[in-house]
Amino acid sequence: MRKVLVLMLLAGCGVPSGNPVPQAARLSDTVLTLTLSDGTVCRADWAASGGSGRLEECGPGYGYVVNVVENPNVLRQLFTGIVDALGADGVSPPLAEVVITDPAGMDRVFVSPPEVEG
């Protein structure tokens, strides 16, 4: 048993990686919220930055690009129109792809709002 543990440690199985991994990215009409594997939650005003930037105070720093879907399907457009007409601006997050780039240059792609499983 001891030999197995030593081999796992030597192989890197039991050693945590240095940087936390992005687990989720969510958008509001102006704010990107990134959740990392160590529980850290970081926020950036993606709308004010033009849709791309860096989360410098977020662990080792992560880059982001938000690609908003300009012409979503008809049902999405109808829903968003009704919500806006009722005066609930910002309730319906934009439909977008969020690309998070870690310090090693690896991209992780998320969709917002997240897909519903079931």
Image (spheres, rainbow, N blue to C red):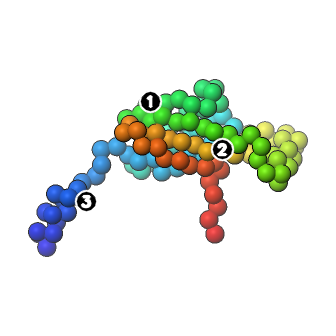
Percent of width and height locating residue 88 = 80, 41
- Residue 56 shows which numbered tag? 1
Q: Secondary structure at mark 2?
A: strand
Name the residue carrying label 3.
Answer: 13
Near mark 3 (Cα within 10 A), the count class, few <14, some 14-19 or many ≥20, is: few
Question: For the residues carrying marks 1 and 3, which lies nearer the camera in this image?
Answer: 3
Q: Residue at x 13, y 73 (%)?
A: 1
| Amino acid type of the residue that numbered disc 2 sits on in the rendered structure | Ala
When asked about the image quadrant of residue 86, the answer is top right
Q: Residue at x 48, y 47 (%)?
A: 108
| Amino acid type of the residue that numbered disc 1 sits on in the rendered structure | Glu
Percent of width and height locating residue 95 = 69, 46
Q: Residue at x 20, y 63 (%)?
A: 8
Percent of width and height locating residue 80 = 81, 46
Q: Residue at x 58, y 43 (%)?
A: 98
Asked whether, in this view, residue 61 is left or right of residue 1, the answer is right
For the C terminus, the image quarter is bottom right
Q: Are marks 2 and 3 in contact (CB under 8 Å)?
A: no
Is residue 108 in view? yes
